[in-house]
Amino acid sequence: MSLNKPILWNFYRGASWRVRIALAFKKIDYEYKSVNIDKGEQFTKEYENINPNNEIPTLQIDGFNLTQTMPIIEYLDETRPSEPKLIPVDSYLRCRARSIAEIVNSGMQPYQKVIKRLGKELGEEEKNARLELSTKKAFKAIESILAETSGKYCIGDSITIADIFLVPAVHAARLQKINLNHYPTISRITDRLDQLPEVIQTHPKKQVDFQQS
Ligand SMILES: N[C@@H](CCC(=O)N[C@@H](CS)C(=O)NCC(=O)O)C(=O)O
């Protein structure tokens, strides 16, 4: 294990926020390195050496370059087993927590990334309609899982990886002005999550590279 301070290569918005929240809950201090993906900084030689997939975030920790938010958060939880346990111990609840995270991670977010890239070709109205449809599909599925698993948070009363993936997804939906009234449990849980210092301090608006869009 390296004793160097961890470095998070990231950008104020998007998937990076997940890792910032996990680091905050695990009380891990780190250096913030901004990679401005609007300017294509993910394609610089320096960054490509760290992450050949040219995506953010990358977490440099314990002498490793870790990529992909799901396994990064799992690594942090396994190597720093202090509370909160981000990955539930119970097999069923662990499966459900990962299901919620994956609905966002592999279901909704990559599709939305493509829609945003095609923005100009689709036109504003069509782009927004597709973003809304994919958000609603994901949130409907998450809401149905929460009917069984939720307490104060997605899985019972403690923070898990499911909450960490939900926060940025709901933030994006609000920015897109998507009506969340049909998802009362998601709304209740994220209203509570929004009050937590770990979420407040890692919010996109609080980051040094924040830009008003
Ligand atoms: N599944 C990846 C998603 C990462 C991702 O989509 N990152 C976006 C920013 S939110 C990115 O790097 N976009 C730049 C690009 O695709 O060129 C993860 O969980 O880390």
Image (spheres, grey):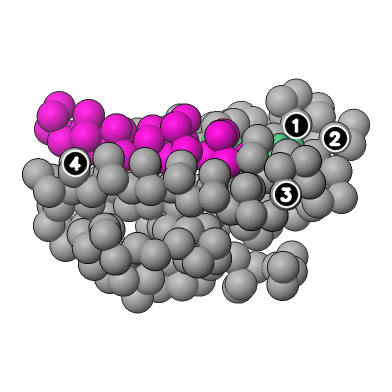
Task: Tell me the kind of residue under disc 3.
Answer: Gly
SS at circle 4: helix
Q: Position of residue 88 (x, y in %)?
A: 21, 38
Ligand 1's image quarter is top right
User: Residue placed at 87% from the left, 50% from the top?
Assistant: 39
> In the picture shown, does residue 127 fall above or below 2?
below
Q: Earlier in the sequence, mark 2 or mark 3?
A: 2
- Distance in Å between CA atoms under marks 1 and 4: 33 Å
Q: Which mark is drawn over residue 123?
A: 3
Tags 1 and 2 touching, CB below 8 Å:
yes
> 83 or 117: nearer the eye?
117
Query: Is residue 105 one of those drawn in magenta?
Result: yes
> For the residue carrying disc 2, how many other residues have a C-alpha within 10 Å: few (<14), some (14-19), or many (20+)?
some
Q: Position of residue 157 (x, y in %)?
A: 15, 57
> 159 or 194: nearer the eye?
194
Q: Quadrant of the C terminus?
A: bottom right
Q: Which mark is drawn over residue 43?
A: 2
Q: Which mark is drawn over residue 62?
A: none
Q: Position of residue 80 (x, y in %)?
A: 37, 42
Q: Which residues are magenta?
A: 89-113
- Within 8 Å: ligand 1 and the Cβ of disc 1? yes
- Within 8 Å: ligand 1 and the Cβ of disc 2? yes
Task: State which mark lies toward you, 1 or 4.
Answer: 4
The residue at the far left in this view is 148
Q: Quadrant of the N terminus?
A: top right
Q: Which mark is drawn over residue 145?
A: 4
Q: Earlier in the sequence, mark 3 or mark 1?
A: 1
Residue that badge 1 annotates = 54
Q: Is residue 86 left or right of residue 133?
A: left
SS at circle 1: loop
